[in-house]
Image: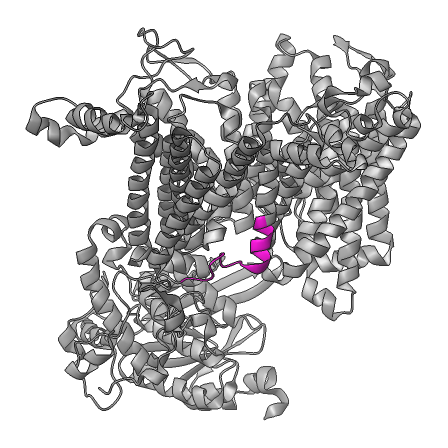
Amino acid sequence: MSETDSGDEPKGYGQSEEEDQSVLFGIDFRNDKYMLLTLLVGVFALYLIGGVVIGLPFRGLMNQLGQLSFWIAVFAMSALALNLHWGYTGLFNIGIVGFMATGVYITGVLSKPVFGSGTSAAEVGGFGLPLLVGIVGGMAAAAILGLIAALPALRLRADYLAIVTIALSEIVRFSLLSDTLSSADVAGYKVGLGGGDGVILDYGDPLEVFVRTASVPFDLVFGQSGWLWEEVYLGVLVEAVGSAIPNNPKPVVDNFAYAFVLLLVLGGFYVLITRIGSSPFGRVLKAVREDEDVTNALGKNTNVFKIKSFMVGCALMGLIGILWFGTQGSVTPNTFRPRITFYVWIALIIGGSGSNTGSVMGGAIFAAFLFQGPRYFKNIVETVLGNPEAPSSFGQAMAPLSGGDIFPMLLYTLDSIRQLQLFLMGVVLIWLMHRRPDGLLGHRKESASSIPLTRPTKKAATDGGEDQ
Amino acid sequence: MSDAEPSDATDSETDSGGVTVPDADADVELDAVSESADMVDVPLKVRDLRKTFGGITAVDNAGFEIKKGSMTGLIGPNGAGKSTTFNCITGTYTPDSGVVEFNGEDITGLEPYEVAERGLVRTFQIARELSEMTVLENMMVAPMHQRGEALWRSVFARNDVNKQEEEILERAWETLEFFDIEHLANEYAGNLSGGQRKLLEMARALLTDPDMLLLDEPFAGVNPTLEERLLEHIHELRNQGYTFLIVEHDMDLIMENCEKVIVMHQGRILTEGTPEDVRNNEDVIEAYLGGEV
Amino acid sequence: MGASESVTRGRELIVEKPMTAALVFIGVVLLLDMLRQLLTGELAISGMLGLIKDGLMRGLVIGLAGIGLSMTYSILNFANFAHGDYITAGAFSGWSVTYLIAGGFGAEANIGSLALVGAGGSVFGGALGVNIVNTPLAVLAGLIVAGSLTIGLALFIDRFMFKPIRDAGGIPLLITSIGVAFALRYLILFVFDSSTRGTTDAGTVPDIRPLVLDGTVPLTLHDGFLVVVAGGLMLGVHFLLQRTKLGKAMRAMSDDESLARITGIPTERVIRSTWIIGGGLTGIAGYMFVLWKGTLSWNDGWLLLLLIFAAVILGGIGSVYGAILGGLVIGLTASTAVIWIPSGFARAAAFVVMILVLVARPQGLFSGRSTA
């Protein structure tokens, strides 16, 4: 065989020609991984500088950075899970929040201490199962809810699936709110969803459970239960930070440690979704996204592929719900409004659907600039201004405008930043759909095969040259 | 079961100068030899097929048989029911009544993927490429029952999956070479020209390891040069043992290239026979050729 | 003869459409259960009539707002998730005017508070005596402003948000509309704050309480006004679609846009007219809803949106009559569901009905007849 002359090779996979411009300081910015790293370093640097400039106390600054890491991990994971649905399979799921709620609520019911066991002053009890069992149960419940939604709905058009999933997420919320399910006797256990008051998640500190679980092999070696937690975490880590923050350092360390756990889980998500995407399974998913009839005509049972993809994504969303809301001490139904779904969609669209590194970047950009950014900005400005009293209504802010005093309006704006940031997100989403439908950073291609798609080399030794 | 075991690498060692023959063909030929004893000579039988939409009868008691290794043309004026017949055979529609039999098995009313799994694979009238995937990825979707299509294996048994991926990749390349579109391998399918899409679609269908190919207007919108090439490929594949049923409304093409022609008119089979017979059939001239002859 | 025929048809239904048959079966069971409840006195007849009345009123609002959604869904081919917030925008703008007029432009309360519909509890509709009898002018002016402002808003959003990407397809438009919805909703929240205000002086609205067997079913003048306004507008739309050239063009476009374009129908003008009609009806629906229920909140439109989608899908996308009928069915479902299930699930029941319809008959219950 003769070699293909490289002139014939079309430019594949977004290989850019202007190599020199994108390589700076020896770092190749065309590479997504470096781009992601740069982004993360930049974001943290920005937050750090912002905090230092206004003289935020060290403790507050650390808390901000810990929170930032938490949000980046949460939204990156969410975007990845949604990418499996929408980016790979073309399943228009706008009921994400319903699966998150299912995950955390079922975990709560399974793992809360049994009613009346003393420690719990909560209105209902749980089954008292270990937290890890509860987490698996919560994920399974989310997956099963996904299956229930998927069985009838997957053959519908994308816009119908959208309406069905968002209705489903609202049905979940109404069910959580209902008095009927708030408390019940199941096999002698007094359990329930708590109705409008929500559920107190008194199953112990998840971080401690995670660390103690990770400690099992060490425990065998050192003959001490929870060695990693007692000796390393409390004994070394918290002690060490205590020298910088003498007054109650544990919450600060907890913040970072939990964010670190989430980043580990995020890594797991990334590997999982990337493996799914770059495999024959993922290839069929992408084919379904492009044209389901064709894929079916090629002998693939597309419904089975869609259901699997949907269930896996839902289970992951359930897990995110558990990791996100499960540390807040309690959950109430009205937390789970569609705006959380909206957050995840913006994160995915910023990153560009279909791409995993894009999803992570989208999650990070969303968390840093659209979600946490405005709140941090508010903190900073308020600190600088010495926490002035803002007008309580738009009218009171408007009135001084006629006298040329714009200050009350600015304060009101700042005070309402949580509402305005949703306005801003809406505008950003519109802008993205108009100008950057492939994502803020442009279209990126990820291979749909588990091996590099270069020409096979085995036939003739001379062919080897073309593999880079 | 036709578990898509891509054949050994050695099978594909073919003459280096000429056209490379895809592995798939080797398999089919082997199958043909080993099964020839009990093998049906008539893989596809259609009997009394009927399909109505609302009050309109699109296919009315249509029936025909396709011989193994033959190339049959299905022609007829617009609205004659060719496409509906096609869709009833391949599972896109469920016929109201009638029987479709493939390799001795009743496949009436099966889902499209089940029909394809049995070795009866179709292409579409308007070539439907998976546009946001590259040509190579399009190809690699096709092989049936890939081990990596199991979710757990795609995550946890990568080495196992990779081994088969290499074989699939190789077959995909070879088939692309056979159709002379290997230079487009890493192009997005959406960027191909109409004719290239037709080639891709046929190449992709071949990778499913079919016994028989149903081509829905394979020459529509293809320029004459490409049409010539496409025809060459079809003839070559036919010589290797594939069976073809081609829906087409370009009469001359069918007359010149098929050994058997089925003519449909108003949902019924008007006549069938050799091109010669059909050309001289009064009814056909009446219904279809009209003033042309 | 009739009986055996229906038995045969029933058998056909079970064999050919098991899903539909199951739905029919569930419906029959529910009806029987309602009869049981009525006979045993668990449910008062007057109570049931009250629920039905409530459902019909809600249904009228849903149907009125649904007409616009259905028309844009079929003509522009996308599900407009911002539609609910058009309702909210219409309601706030209309009620702002009503408050201003009823409050004598600052005579009875701070003019800013009036304009902001009593943000932060500064003015109450009850204190201003707002209702159709005391302040008819304020109500009518509010109604008109709600309609016209929503028309302006719908046209503005179409021009700058949807039109530039109209060729991109239904899904990008849908996603964009979600962005529009959030931007609009939270802008309203920013300006008008998050309080739920009482808007009417409900106590002085004249009503009749006819005695029905075992109790009374109150009917207020606001109920009557809603029926008149909604019914009148629906009739108006009917005549517009059937009798005018514009109506014919709209029906043609909803059937097949490219064909309509080829046949020389001025598609841009038809699209604009669609937004004008749809936006106007939606804004008025928002205003009337608030007048009828007596409260106003920034979330009203969103909460109504999914019910409207349910109605539109039930009625068959693109069908105006379907949207009206679907609205009544969904309104009735949401109100009367409490007969069978705990009230916490009433809204969920309407969504379940929608999902069942999508699964069993995605083309809608009333499609297959004439569009429009």
Q: Camera-side residue: A75 or B192?
A: A75
Q: Is residue B90 above or below residue C37?
A: below
Report the residue at 7% width, 23% height from top: A223
Can residue C237 be seen here? The reply is: yes
Q: Is residue A460 above or below residue A207?
A: below
Residue C114 belongs to the span the image colors magenta: no
Residue A21 x, y percent position in the rendering: 40, 70
Q: Camera-side residue: A281 or C120?
A: C120
Viewed as shown, does residue B96 lie left or right of C72? left
Report the residue at 37% width, 26% height from top: A327
Viewed as shown, does residue B247 lie left or right of A114? right
Q: Camera-side residue: B146 or B69?
A: B146
Magenta-highlighted residues: A428-444
Corner quadrant of residue C87: top right
Viewed as shown, does residue A440 lie left or right of A409? left
Can residue A306 be seen here? The reply is: no
Residue A432 belongs to the span the image colors magenta: yes
Q: Is residue A246 above or below residue C235?
A: above
Residue B149 x, y percent position in the rendering: 28, 55
Viewed as shown, does residue B159 lie left or right of B210? left
Question: In the displayed image of the protein, which residue is found farthest to the bottom?
Answer: B293
Q: Is residue A461 above or below residue A72?
A: below
Residue C208 x, y percent position in the rendering: 85, 14
Residue B234 x, y percent position in the rendering: 36, 83
Report the residue at 75% width, 63% height from top: C267
Corner quadrant of residue B258: bottom left
